Structures are given as C-alpha cells and as structure tokens.
Image (cartoon, coloured by chain):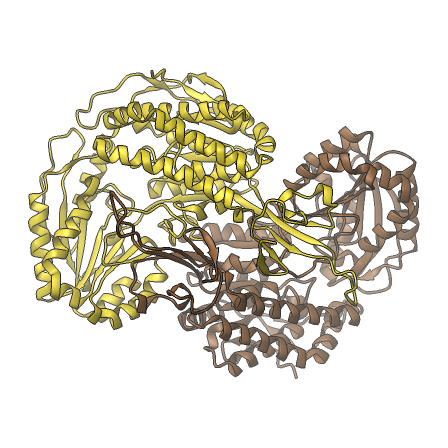
Chain colours: A brown, B yellow
Amino acid sequence: MLTGEMFVGAARVSGSGKEVRSRDPRTGEELEPGYRYGGAAEVARAASLAEEAFDVYRATDSETRAAFLERIADEIGALAEPIVERAVLETGLPQARLTGEVGRTTGQLRLFAATLREGSWHGARIDPAQPDRTPLPRADIRQRRVPLGPVAVFGASNFPLAFSVAGGDTASALAAGCPVVVKAHDAHLGTSELVASAVRAAVVACGLPEGVFSLLVGDGPELGTRLVTDPRIQAAGFTGSRRAGLALASAAASRPQPIPVYAEMSSVNPVVLLPDALASRGADLGAAFVASLTLGAGQFCTNPGLVLAVEGPGLDEFLFAAAEAVRADQGGTMLTLGIAGAYASGQDRLAGRPGVTELARGEAGSAAACGGAALLTVDGSRFTAELQEEVFGATSLVVRCADQAELLGVVRALEGQLTATVHASEADEPLAAALLPVLERKAGRILFNGWPTGVEVGHAMVHGGPFPATSDSRTTSVGSLAIERFLRPVAYQDVPAALLPPVLRDGNPEGVWRRIDGELSRD
Amino acid sequence: MLTGEMFVGAARVSGSGKEVRSRDPRTGEELEPGYRYGGAAEVARAASLAEEAFDVYRATDSETRAAFLERIADEIGALAEPIVERAVLETGLPQARLTGEVGRTTGQLRLFAATLREGSWHGARIDPAQPDRTPLPRADIRQRRVPLGPVAVFGASNFPLAFSVAGGDTASALAAGCPVVVKAHDAHLGTSELVASAVRAAVVACGLPEGVFSLLVGDGPELGTRLVTDPRIQAAGFTGSRRAGLALASAAASRPQPIPVYAEMSSVNPVVLLPDALASRGADLGAAFVASLTLGAGQFCTNPGLVLAVEGPGLDEFLFAAAEAVRADQGGTMLTLGIAGAYASGQDRLAGRPGVTELARGEAGSAAACGGAALLTVDGSRFTAELQEEVFGATSLVVRCADQAELLGVVRALEGQLTATVHASEADEPLAAALLPVLERKAGRILFNGWPTGVEVGHAMVHGGPFPATSDSRTTSVGSLAIERFLRPVAYQDVPAALLPPVLRDGNPEGVWRRIDGELSRD
C-alpha cells in the first residue's frame, strides 16, 4: 500500500536525495519503504502548483470547501485501520490513542466545514453609501476577508494525525481557501503518505486543481527553509521545537516579502496549587498530576512541566503522592530515538541545575526509545530563568515557595505559555483572583481544577499564547478561530453590484451575519 | 502655551539631547520653542510607566475606556483653534484641511468609543460544558480577547492629527486597553505637544494611571529602535517611509521576544482605466485624476502614482487633459524641506528611468518646501519593477499598454498596494471582472469610478494591504477593525463563575454578541 513517494500535486514522485525510513521506536527497527528526500525541485514544483491552484481554489464557495473538508474526513475515515496500524508502528503510541486521534482529525475537518457554512469567517461588513452627507458624500464601502495564498504546513511528531498532514493547520488553511504544501515529519512517513493519499483522493473527487495539496519529504532545516522562503508561499503553520520554530520564523521575516509564521513552540504549562486546595486534597492532586504528566510519555505540548506551590503540609502530601506515582510509573515509548535521547539529556540538565533536587524517578521502560518520568523540586528562592526550559517528556519541576509573594514572583518571571492551571478551593478564590490577571498575560488558556493535557477542539479553545509558547500570540492553532490566521481583509468601494462577491451583495444572498454600519445583522 | 517639553506620564520633561525645532515649510523658518531630544532614559521611564499602568488600564470596562476616548476628543475639540493654527505653521497644509482633520481625529476617537460599547471587540465565545459527553466529558471553555500590552506609536508627517499623537493607531490601541507611548514627528512638534496636552488632560479627568499615555521627542532611528526593542513594549503602529518601517519591523523581529509591528509604508495606488470608460470620458477622467494627484501636494498614502491603460484615442484624450491640468497646477507646499528634497530627487530619478518620457510638469510654487506635479509615461513593454517605486508627492506615471494582455501583465507584476482603482463603464464589466481577482491579491482596498485619495473612517474600511504597502496585511490601520491589532485571545476552562470576566459570565451581563457553541447570540 505504501510506495515511498511524495505527492507533488497529482504526481507521486520520488526525491533524489538521501533515502530515509521511519523507525519503530519500540524496537528501533527501520520500517519499509524508504523515502528519498526531495529538495529545491520538489519545493518549486509544489509551490508553483499551489500558486496556480490558488485563484481557482479561493474562488470556490463555502459549501464547496466544506464538502471538500468533509470528503477528506471521509477518506481518512475509510483508511482509519491502515492509518492507525502504521501510526502505531511509527510512533509507539497506543492504538486506542491513535484511533481517538483519527476521530479528532476528522472532527477537526468537520468543525471547519461547519465554520465555513456558518459564514462569519467572511468577516463581511457593509457601510452603505450616504450620498447626501455633508460636506462630502460617503461612498459605499464593503469588506470581506480573502485568503493569504499558498500555506506551508509542518507535520508535528507528537500528533501524527491531528497536527500533521491533514491536521489543524492544514484544515484551517484549506478552509480559508489556501492551497497547502505539507512537509512530512520523518518520524511518521508512512502515516503521512496514507493520509496524503486520502487528501489527494478528496481533491480528485471534488474536482479541485491538483495544486491544492502537496506532501513533501525532505531534510527539516533545508526543505523547511526552502518552503517558507519560496516567494509563492504566503504563510506557514508549525508545531515543534523552539529552535526549529524560531529558525522558520526568522527565515520568513528575512524574505524580501516577509510572511506570517504560526509556530507553536515550547511551554512548560505551569500548574499553581493554592493553599486550601492543597490542604484539602494534596494527595489526590499529586496522583492526578502524575497521571497528566505521564500521559503519552509526557509528549504533549501542554504537559505540566512546572508546579508552583507554597510550602506546607498540603504540599508535602502532594509531593509524597506524586513521588509515589512517579516511582510506580513503568515509563513509556517515546516518539523517536532522537526525542528519547533529547529527553534523557534534558532531564539530566534540569536535574543538575543549582538547587534542583530529584524527588523521584520512574522506570524507563523497555522500548528502544524509552523515557521515564522524573519529579524534581527547587526552592522558590532559587528559581531562575533556565529552570523554565522545556524538557519534552514526563519530567516536572515543583517550585516550593516560601510564601504567596514568592509564588507570585515566580509566576511573574515566567515566559509565555500555552496553558496555566490553577487548583483552588472556594477559600482560595481571593488569591486566585489576584493570580488570574498575571496568568492572563502569560498564557493562551487558563484552566481551573483540571489538567492541561487534552486540548478540546471547539470554537472557544485557544491553543496559543505569548512568545515563546508561539511566535504569534494573536491567534490559536486549535479550534475554529484558527481559520483567521490565513485571511486578510479587503475593502470594496463603489464596486458595481454585479462584480461584488456574493457575500457582500445587497439582500444577503448567502444569509450570513454581516456588520452593517457597525451592527451585526443577518438581513 | 507651548513649553518645548515631552510628556513622560504626568511629568513634562525636557530631553538632554540635541535641540530641534519644527520649521514652517512655506518659509523655511524655524518655529519656537525648541524641543530637546530624549533618549534611553525617557524611553525607559515612559515604558516603565506604561507597564505599571497596563494592569489597571486593561481592567477598566468598555464604558470607562469609551468615556476616556470621548474625553480626549472633547479636549482636542476645545483646543482645535490653537492646534489648527500651529499645524498650519508646521505643515503648510491649508487651514480648512486641518480643521477637517481635527474632526476626523475626534470622529475616529468617537468611533472607537462606539466600538467599545457595542462589545463585539471582546470576541466572546462560550463552549458550554458537556458533562455527559462520551467517551470524555467536555469542560466549560470560554474565550475573550485581552490587550497585548504597551504600544509604541509613531506620528506620521502627512496627517499631523489623524495619524499622529491621538490618531488612529493611538485611538485603537487605547480602545483595546493598551497604554501608548508616542514618538512625536519632528515636523510638527508644537502640534504634537498641544494634542498630547489634550490627551494628558483626559487621563487626569478620567482618573487613569499616568502611564497610559506618554509623548516622546527624539531622533527617529535611535529613539524608534529603543522604543520597539524595549521589553515592555508589546506592539507598534507606524505610518511613514518604507525604509523606516522596515527598520522598525526588523528591530522588532530581532528582539528576544519578537512583537508585531503594523507599519503602513509605501504604495503607488494603481489606477486602471478600462477601454469604454476611457472612450466615453477620457478627458473628464484626465482632469479628475490630476485633481486627486495634486490634492495636498500629492502627500497622501493613497495618492495615485501609477495609471494603467491600453493605447487608443481615449487614452490620448485622458493624457491631453491630464497634461493640461498638470501644467496649470500652481504647485504646493510640501510638509518639510526634507520631503520636498526627496520628492525632487525621486521625481528626477523616475523621469530618468529608461523608457520614461515626461509629458507635463506643473509649477513648483513659491514655498521653501515646494513641489510641482509631474506626469510621466512609459510603454507597457518597458515597465520594470523599479518603476513602481513610490515618489511621495504629485508625480504619476502612466503606463501605455499595447493591449489588455499587456495591461494584465503589468498589474500582475505589481507589489502590494493600499488601494487599486478601476474606472469602468458597464461595457467594461467583463474585463473588470477578470481584473478584480488580480487586484484582490494586490490591494487592501479596491475602488471603482472614484479616486483613492480620501480614506473614509468607518467599520468597513481597509487601509492596509499586502507587503510592502504594509508590514502586516492581516489588518487595517483605519476603521474600527484596527482595534483587533492590539488584542489576543485567551481561553478560560472551568474557571469559577465569580472569577470569570463579566463579558463571559452566564446571563450575558454586558449584553454583547457572543458565540455560543459556534452560534452568535445576545442571550
């Protein structure tokens, strides 16, 4: 079923570069087939096809694009079994998790289909003409949003489906009317090929131009830079490491025409345990925390890598229970041998920082790419900037603060985060109220009495946050708002009725919400 | 009335750097008082006060901020006479134009007050909890937008009021809840001081923290770079030259924490004359075109610097009438001696390009900073990228195309623009329909049968466009949408009711439009 080829528009092609294979992280074994890296020629061809497709694709109406997204979801659903089977081999993630991720991926595509049909994505605004206004008449001015152009998407290692070939970035860019060129992640090449074949089938079934979608395989830094600096590419979506995200953002900013890069990069997702919550359920919190920490071997963007609390018996109970749970943990399979290696050295680096004490370490497990949990602590007075470096995996640092002032000081010193979690009882609410405005400046999502792992795909979700959580805090990479990343407004002044886009015509033929002279209306 | 001082929060302070004076561009005479440049100390102090003010200011409700903006408008209105008087001296712009600009500036402030009260700016979204959902319950997730933080605003030379101290960037940033630090433009220091005193009076009257507003005077590149690289500044708004805009954007992108820069930079605002429109009213179009070209000595961002048409008798009539009008033009006072010098050399450079012919030149006028209109032509076959360099002033280049294909080719080769104008009769509509999608990719505003000068301040306006018209095509610097530039979304998951921001509480106490499970509602 797998050919080891890329999809450059309609063509299945093989690169002329290095041949690579994904590996089973459980065994370290290479998986067939091999995939040869593409380079300049494939980037140029895919970008050129995307550019050719753009004008046709962006002129399609909401219904056509919604049906296309649903068709992709259907095609992925039809291939769910081989996709999950291959993804298990390539990622070591459990079958149930990957089956769930297929559902999340197709659900995401359907969410954007619904968002298209609802129509507010157009951002339609009409300021009607005022021919009798003095001293000057007002022209008729109408506004809608149009897509930016071809978008480069980078598959993420830790969500081989939901943040990869047909994941959130691809779904939102396609919804916006932007052709997509995906760079496959080397860790799951077969999964990528299967999903790409599903997207490709939907392109054909919907009669869309071939350039609407391409899948490239290539060296990360080299092909990535080529993609974001190709003059036809107009935006990029990325989830991965801070180093890689910053490199892409910097390449994009250095173009003769800079383009937006939406890079979701790094976050330690602080969890703040307030005194009464700790006192009343410290042990329960400790156990639940470790369940979140070790979920998926700690390989979530929202993994709780930092815990903040004030010293006391409640914190002792929390730490006791958490340490016990960490010690009992059997470890997990990490996504790649490289990630496992980086995790081990990151864990050691953090454990070796001045003032940091190791409280507990779990089993590493028997996988080739294994990684064990670790629980570290440090006194609040010794908390430094370097202690908030993300260690991708199930390692967390508990900051033991002398008092609330010290705790607030540590929170204020944090970098931007995807999430910030507060555990609070009712009695903690005054303190929580003081904390909330500080957290609002630090994180894209603030959650109470839960755990940050698990990102709901909906309309209100924000999976984003201030730098360095992302390269652009003004948006989200999960949820329906993500479509706005790939749109820009255009105003039409006194454009003849027949030439206006349907969504801006008198009588509201598309029946969408529009802002008329500043007031929302469906008339 | 003028003291020659800056406003660093509540303090009127004098810098310790070079002393500068604005000049009357009509005579070249220096105007009292002198203003001494501020530097690192003033930037640090203003940024620090802005940061201190931020948490208090952003916590104010829509009504408080709306009343503040209206108070600024009132204070400016009360000072209108001295402001206009001084602005005439500093800019050479006619009194009537400046009186109108006062109205535009206060109208802009009031528009954002109305936008705040309407409430959609919050971007409120609620996905209610689904405790019974299987396999996993859904948490309660709510979203609103919060301000980015202190904003740096750069006063523009060509709109000493509407794009300066209390102009569109300041109004939209203050509306969003962001304190503002303005860098005054050297060309209108006295006007800046007067307007700043009005803003300062409003800050006091409304009982807001002093750091909500500061006005700095300083060396453009030096103080500008200091401002956008100060770690407390979180975004910047700029209108001016491409060189200065790119320098600010580059400095902002190189920060340890990059920030958004909204720079409105350069545009030649192409005007496309379609065959039937030319044939039926070529001479009228020629005269009307020159009226737009020479308005305000051609010193509008949206000045029509490029005209495209197919050869024929209609174009000949257009050119004949336009040339006549240019020759009859008496020239105008330019904003500064520097701008007049740059205009003269830009005009010569463009006129000297291969293939460019000078068709007509107007009088330069008698002002010290004078500038005369010029009409140049070139054959479409000889159109090159360097011919779309903006010459800030009343010079325009008419591209005579052999046929429609050549015309479309020239349009396709254009850089990003603020505006694109089409003159079309009904008979031209098929061609206009083919042109429209091309223009949508080039410009932020497309207008028919009018002239691009004159930017209506409303809800549907887009004053923006693809690079290099602006550094960020995803927004506008004029109109109510501009508030979104200074906001970012935050999600609240299972946050206790008492801690939720009012706009996200059950029962919709603020009575604003919110998206509930994806559907807009006021319930």
- Residue A358 lies in quadrant: top right
* Quarter of the picture holding the N terminus of chain A: bottom right
The answer to whether residue B253 is visible is no
Drawn side of residue B35 relative to residue A396, left or right: left
The answer to whether residue B188 is visible is yes
In depth, the one of B338 and B59 nearer the eye is B59
Q: Position of residue B32 (x, y in %)?
A: 28, 17
Q: Position of residue B268 (x, y in %)?
A: 27, 51
Q: Position of residue B291 (x, y in %)?
A: 16, 47
Drawn side of residue B363 relative to residue A475, left or right: left
Q: Is residue B488 above or below residue B102?
A: below
* Quarter of the picture holding the C terminus of chain A: bottom left
Which residue sits at x=54%, y=24%?
B207
Drawn side of residue A399 relative to residue B102, left or right: right
Drawn side of residue B294 relative to residue A359, left or right: left
Which residue sits at x=27%, y=32%?
B99
Q: Is residue A78 above or below residue B504?
A: below
In depth, the one of B235 and A191 nearer the eye is B235
Q: How many marks?
A: 0
Which residue sits at x=34%, y=40%?
B240
In depth, the one of A442 and A70 nearer the eye is A70
In depth, the one of B177 and A135 nearer the eye is A135
- Residue B477 lies in quadrant: top left
- Residue B7 lies in quadrant: top left
Q: Position of residue A336 (x, y in %)?
A: 73, 63
